[in-house]
Image (cartoon, rainbow, N blue to C red):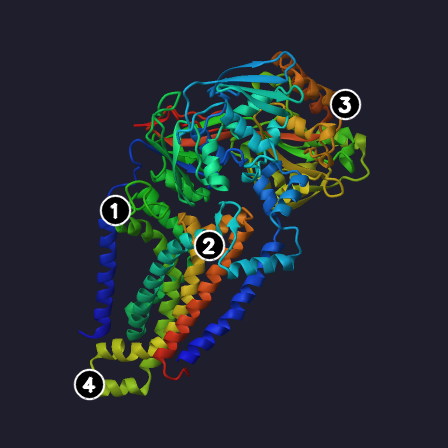
Amino acid sequence: MGRYLARRLLSAIPVILGITVIVFLIMSLIPGDPATAILGSYATPENVEKLNRDLGLDKPLFQQYFIWLGNMLHGDFGTSYSLNRPVIDEVLDRFSATLILAGVSFVLCSVFGIMVGVISAARQYGLADKALTFAVLIGISIPSFFLGMLLILIFAVRLKWLPASGMFAIYGGGDLPDLINHLILPAFALSVVATGVVARLSRSAMLEVLRQDYIRTARAKGVGERDVIWRHALKVAMVSIIPVLGIQAGFVLSGAVYIEVVFQWPGVGRMLVDAILKRDILLVQGGVTFVAACYVLFNIVVDIAQSLLDPRIKT
Amino acid sequence: MFGPFKASQSLMALTAALALTVGATVTSKAQTPPGVLIVGQIAEPKSLDPAAVTAQNDFRILVNIYDGLVRYKDGTLEVEPALAESWDISDDGTEYIFHLREGVTFHDGTPLNAEAVKFNFERMLNEDHPFHDTGPFPLAFFFSSIDSIEAVDDLTVKMTLSEPYAPLLSNLAYPTGLIVSPTAVGANGADFGRNPVGTGPFKFAEWRSNELVAVEAYADHWDGAPASEAVVFRPITDANTRTAEMLSGGLDIMSEVPPVSLSEFQNDNFQIYEQAGPHLWFLILNLKEGPFTDKLVRQAANYAINKTAIVENVLEGTAEVAAGPTPPAFAWAYNEALEPYPYDPEKAKALLEEASPETTELTFYVTEGGSGMLDPVAMGTAIQADLNAVGFDVSIETYEWNTFLGEVNPGLEGKADMAEMAWMTNDPDVLPYLTLRSEAFPDQGGFNSGYYSNPEVDELLQTARVSTDQDERAEAYKQMQEIVHEDAPWVFVANWKQNAVSGANVENFQLQPSFLLELKDVAKN
């Protein structure tokens, strides 16, 4: 197990390095430069040139890359131009907000997705199955940002039940009920598509397992149907469901970008969108690298979970 | 019964539990606390250091934290005393002596005195100043005519100019001229922009990244305590979400309402505000090469474009058709006699035929969006269609705003025949001086990207700039407008009317022609 873990962690290094190269290149290739963004409409070419020099952006690309990478290895992600704040502080602040949103959505999509999938499979072609399959189809088909706007319109603007945006009430909030209040709409909007995907795959995984001989054996031995499905079959089906959950975790993390913009959730996704619009190169580079690294690590965790559950995977 | 049924039961139970949680946590309909104004803004401020920022969005917060030596009189662009109680200008217009108000302190207790004022301007202008590196200061050129600044005594400041410069007072009233606490700059250095200290009616309380900037009433303000206990500025970048937040009651005031959303607020729960300001949306024409070297062709373009349709349909009535280079908001300097070029495609065709340029192919730079640009892509497309209809052949090239500035500011030569542009300014001098003078060609550090040059205009602008007699200045600007209108180095398109919406319970709110958001006297019931 230790060796497997070490191997997986080592293999993550080139991946993360590759990400830094890509992120760096993309940010240097996209149009617009930070000096113009900082100086605004009144930027004369002369001032732009001077500021670019001050920011070290006149150096050759590869040199800029290695300076950036070197600093990052020392934990220095640079200072955001637009926020005038260390990138790492900003990213860490924001990442917790994203983790809350994506985490809750992930739990929602896992729990509800698996439940729906299992129920559908157990009642294959029954009324419940047909109704759920239809609901899942709708869930998968609605773009999450559209659903988000729809939810805001209904629950915030018309019914005024829930806040339209933000993470906490501006005044007098800050406690858990307040957070939940603000979390309901975005977490729901974010989890719907993923729930649908998990439900579909859980259904087919369960159907696959339910056809196996050992299930028939279990039933023949008199194991109750409830135990057969929830204990025996689901445990085996989980082996094929977990990788899907891993993918969905990445999906909700990336989907959080739209949802954060629509709901003004103060997470890392919205930060990145703002940073791109403001040409805040260091913030984008640092933010994307950080999120990508987390994503890679998360995948390792999923792999390990899978290997623990499925003895066929060699550790 | 068997399992799945139980499972669906528990699913229902869970859903019910979730619904209950929703019900339990919903306290009442969204409501903002009493005494606190929540203001929805289009973006997070870049910095709260007035010398370091250029965006209206940031200025709206700054004017509530800081005061300048002078300020714009309520509802006008005329200058009145603020931190300076009075001032004397020497006869030759090169010496300004400001007499500061007595007993004013910054929020951190630092006294406002001549040294503090001196510190402020030297920080921006003097590259050797120990805190010059807290910049960059993109608008420092507003004060570049200041040669030296001197603390005559504790409450008297003398500014000596290198040449007479009439817009100085108006520039001092602009947010770039707001006075910051030297102690706070010394203590925070480059972080001052996140820990702002001024003398204004509100003192800075908190900045939560991308959530809010909060300011609290400063009861000791020299001009009296503000009407609200606090103001919270919330950045909500997405226009739909901003509108939804306002509709759901999460905001008291919202600036820059998208034109298409205005109708949502036309009911008893809200008040809509509109105010014209010194804004001009125009097309820069390339006078160095291509068809627009010919005045007739430039006039043809002005006749060809249906500005009324753009203003009414694309901008939903949130702007007015522009007549010339000076926005009407500068009432004293605006030439009332000037009429906008009417929409007259036949006349345009005739002019084009008369001029018969070698080519009618035009490259048109359009931006995706940017400060003051309103709806640039839709406007660009409408303009393209109008020009094509009279015989031009316009191809659009679209750029992201910063890239666009990087292409346009260095000049259009060799690249494009026309480009969109918009300016918001504080004095009738700024726009023509930086964009229409012969000496403002891009290679000389100006913004005359279309290379317009007319000695008469140069002379009038110089006269207006050095004169301290407002009537004389006004006369010069009016003549300048006539000449520029006739020469048509630009297509004059629109003057934006800024808008805002507030809850019906908000009192004393008013938009200012300066585009600033003065909230001192605004109260909520």
Contact (CB < 8 A) between labels 1 and 2? no
Question: Considering the numbered disc 1 on the image, is that residue within a helix, a strand or a loop?
Answer: loop
* Mark 1–mark 4 distance (CA, rounded to whole Å): 48 Å
Circle 4 or circle 3, nearest the eye: 3
| Residue A254 point in image, percent of width and height | 45, 59
**Residue B266 seen in render:** no
Q: Name the residue that disc number 1 marks.
A: B26
| Residue B302 point in image, percent of width and height | 68, 30
Nearest the viewer among B329 and A32 is A32
Q: Chain of mark 2?
A: A
In this rendering, the answer to whether A271 lies above or below B389 is below
Q: Name the residue that disc number 4 marks.
A: A222
Name the kind of residue labelled 2 in the image: Ile
Name the kind of residue labelled 1 in the image: Val
Question: Considering the numbered disc 3 on the image, is that residue within a helix, a strand or a loop?
Answer: helix
Residue A157 picture quarter: top left
Q: Name the residue that disc number 3 marks.
A: B455
Residue pictured at 19% horizontal, 85% vertical: A222
B443 horizontally vs A265: left or right: right
Q: Chain of mark 1?
A: B
* Mark 1–mark 2 distance (CA, rounded to whole Å): 35 Å
Q: Name the residue that disc number 2 marks.
A: A88
Other residues around mark 2 within 10 Å, as few (<14) / some (14–19) / many (≥20):
many
| Residue B285 point in image, percent of width and height | 71, 34
* Mark 4–mark 3 distance (CA, rounded to whole Å): 103 Å
Q: Chain of mark 4?
A: A
In the rendered image, residues at marks 1 and 2 fall on the same chain: no
| Residue A210 point in image, percent of width and height | 31, 80
Q: Can you name the residue that lies furthest to the front here?
A: B153
Nearest the viewer among B145 and B455 is B145
Name the kind of residue labelled 4 in the image: Gly
* Mark 4–mark 2 distance (CA, rounded to whole Å): 58 Å
